[in-house]
Amino acid sequence: MKLRILAVGKLKEEYLRAGAEDYAARIRPYAQLELVEVPGLPDPVRATSAAIIKVQTEEGSALLHRVTPGEVLIALDPRGQALTSEGLAEMLAAHESLGSRLAFAVGGALGLSRDVLSRAVSSLSLSAMTFPHGLARLILLEQLYRAFKINRGEPYHK
């Protein structure tokens, strides 16, 4: 299976980089994984709706330019579908059986643009709580690894 994580911004904190690298290495025996970072923009000084939409649109455009033809885009969004780990495993298994190439879009601090959300086949929520986008990326990687372990019937720390 081919997976890509399309994310806005670089992981600045060492603990997030180390965690992301660790889970990426754990996933690679199960899938071809590529981590793609696009530049994030600074938060607007005046967080007006128009300024937020402008940042989301520019970051979203950069993400969408990295989606390849035939790739199934899944957006991470707080309003998305909440799945259990087993539900995510089932979703991955279904896409794997179809030979799908998946790309998960992780927005910046202000979230994903409407364009990214409308281009995505589905959207997933990691939690009803709010996480920094760097931590959301780490949680996504951990949950993808957990899903592969579930699908292979391999033990995983609970």
Image: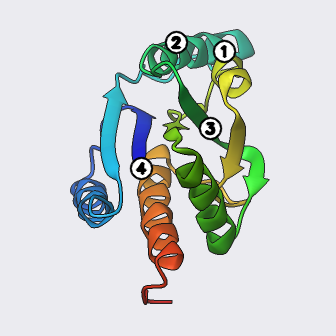
Compare marks 2 and 1 and give the one earlier in the sequence: 1
Q: CA distance from mark 1 to mark 4?
A: 34 Å
Q: Which residue is mark 1?
A: 53
The amino acid type of the residue labelled 3 equals Ala
Q: Which residue is mark 3?
A: 75
Q: How is the image coloured?
A: rainbow
Compare marks 4 and 2 and give the one earlier in the sequence: 4
Q: CA distance from mark 3 to mark 4?
A: 18 Å
Label ID, residue 1: 4
Q: Is residue 62 left or right of residue 21?
A: right
Compare marks 2 and 3 and give the one earlier in the sequence: 2
Q: Secondary structure at mark 2?
A: helix
Residues packed near mark 1 inside 10 Å, few (<14), some (14 to 19) or many (20 plus): some
Q: Disc 2, disc 1: CB below 8 Å?
A: no
The amino acid type of the residue labelled 4 equals Met
Q: Secondary structure at mark 3?
A: strand
Compare marks 1 and 3 and give the one earlier in the sequence: 1
Residues packed near mark 4 inside 10 Å, few (<14), some (14 to 19) or many (20 plus): some
Q: Nearer the viewer, mark 4 or mark 2?
A: 4
x, y percentage for residue 95?
A: 59, 49
Q: Nearer the viewer, mark 2 or mark 1?
A: 2
Q: Nearer the viewer, mark 1 or mark 3?
A: 3
Q: CA distance from mark 1 to mark 3?
A: 17 Å
The amino acid type of the residue labelled 1 equals Ile
Which residue sits at x=51%, y=40%?
102
Depth check, front residue: 144 or 92: 92
Label ID, residue 19: none
Q: Which residue is mark 2?
A: 61
